[in-house]
Image (cartoon, rainbow, N blue to C red):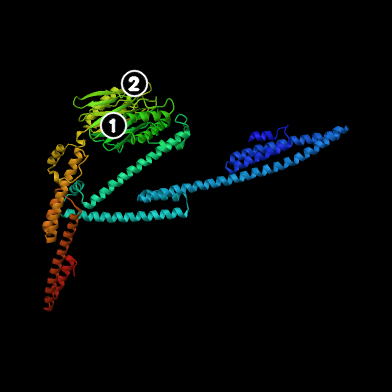
Amino acid sequence: MFDLIKKLFGKKEAASEAVTGFTEAVDWIGAYRKAGNYDTALMAAHELLLKVKTHITYTEQAERKASVLESTNLEDVARAAAEKKKQLSVRLDGLYKWERAVSKLLDDLKHEKVKAEEKAAELLQKRRFEDMEREVNANIKKKDYVKALQSARALVGTFEGNPKAIRLLTKVQDLSERQKTKAEKQAENQKRLQKFIEEVGVDLKDQKNAVEGLSVNVFQKMKLWYADFNKGRREREAYVKEQRSLKEIESLLLRAGGIIDMPEGSEQLLDAVKMGTARAVSGFSIPGFDFFGEIRGKDQIVGDTFGSYQDGKRTVFYFGDATGHGVQAGFTVAALSKLFHEHARKIKSFPELVMRINNDLKDRIKARMFVTAVFFEHDAEKNTLQYIGAGHDKMVYFHHAEKKIELIVPGNVALGVRLIKNVSSIRPRELPMKHRDALFGYTDGFVESRPAPGGEQYGLDRLAESFKAALVKSEYDPDKAYKQIYKAANDYAPNFDDDVSGFIWIRNTDRDVIVDKNELQAILNEVGLRGEEASSNLKNRNRAEIVEMLRKEKFERELKIRLMQLDRLYKMGEFLKLKQRIQENYREGFVHDRMKKYLEKIIANEDKFKMMKLEERLRRKYETLVELQKKGENEIVIREIVEIITRSGKI
């Protein structure tokens, strides 16, 4: 636009061209004005006004020179000067008009800019109010009235005198008071229940343990089924949300021109891949193994990754590490995660799955970016575990029987380095793990950490020995073992230079899926049940799950029988025996809501019986006093009445 302005006031340019250039320049300023880009519009208007004034000065000087030449004695020169002066006068009129127009435009722009800034400030305040209001309503919805009250007070403090904020604070205060009242009532009811239980001599700690081990009744089963259904629905919703996020990341990558060209500092891109600095791997398990994994990033955006997909008895999963760390690594693993979930649902061949992921990732990321990874496939029915490497560091394998360490090289080339044309070049290898054998996969942040710049790396030898010691010390608990491994590495080099992640699988044959009928019958015999008595669905369950389910079923049948016995005693009115039997059930770990109702009835009946006996004694006493009054023994009557009132408060 400024080139147009410069062109407009060029000395050799005709007036008609200048008019066209001026109009176009004003139109551009108008376009900036409509777009709300007032800073650019003001700068352009100032520049335009300066050019107009410069041209006015130049034209005025020319007019004065023409006036001088007009007074010369040379007739031809004077005539030409007079004509030129006339033209310059017309041009000056036009330039003065432009000057006034641009000055007015400049004033209008300044005024509009102030108004726009005021409007933007009002909109910002409005959005801030809506965000704070949304936070208050979200806490109300979650019934977290403590946080809701804090948020509402902050809202009123920020927007003093705002009627809507004051009404919202009042609403939250009312809800908070109601919750306190409700909590007090619940506490009173709990206190009353404790009193009932103490009446029958049951320790509350024993009762709690009994409740935790209790099998549920039919209605509770329905509630648990509904809870499981909701859990599955929430898992599906989380999966859909994850896939949508990954698609958004993919579109952002395409708009950014690829991971290498991605602009640093883009808040939208950062929010799309931000994972937090440390998180445990949740929602993952495979039959026959105990597992724990943690991804810990050096920055907020993590370049380490873990993913899994389960289809019936087949589970495929992987862990990996992208080049470097930070934003670019975060986008690389995000693209890998999307490709893994897309292809794992469709491709059943393990080698073909890895090949497709590699080739598609190669097309999506640019040179110098790659991911080292290890892919696994687990078959729950055959109890087999296979793996395919992708240029990742050695894995640490612990042989429980021999108490020795073996280093496993995953092999192959990292993902995204080159295209794989022949699937036969990818060969899965099997890990025949025995009971309590353990596998540790990690990212290079562990072994490459140094206590100080130039110091010795932590190294694989230290990591392997730490893994072996942690397994024994933790009694083969993967969660505890990993924490000990991380602590040892962190004690050696407190400040890691890269993302640090680790994943532990420990073979546990008690978690194998039971498919053999003889083995299932042996478990039934161990629990003390016959096959026809086991009504639970035992298909595709492991030993620990089957034993727990059968014990619960046995417990539930016994509880049902005991409840029937208590019900008979209640209907017969044998409250003393009923109280004794409830006491026995509590101590043996059999607890049910119906027993609480029986206790309430027993205590209410005892109170009623006590009242009846007291009323009967008072009635007899009253009849005796009436007879004494008739005989004139008033002093004795008064003394007895005072004693009764003092002792029991009854008249």
- Residue under label 2, please give it: 456
Q: Nearer the viewer, mark 2 or mark 1?
A: 1
Marks 2 and 1, how far apart at CA: 36 Å
The x and y percentages for residue 422 are 35, 25
| Residue 633 visible to the viewer | no
- 589 in relation to 387, above or below: below
The x and y percentages for residue 287 are 24, 36
Instruction: Please state which of residues 229 and 346 is positioned toward the viewer in this rendering.
Output: 346
Mark 2 and mark 1 lie on one chain; the one further toward the N terminus is 1
- 582 in relation to 442, above or below: below
The x and y percentages for residue 420 are 37, 25
The three-letter code of the residue at mark 1 reads Glu
The three-letter code of the residue at mark 2 reads Glu
Q: Which mark is residue 159?
A: none
Q: Which mark is residue 377?
A: 1
Q: Secondary structure at mark 1?
A: strand
Q: Local crowd at mark 2 within 10 Å, few (<14), some, or many (≥20)?
A: few
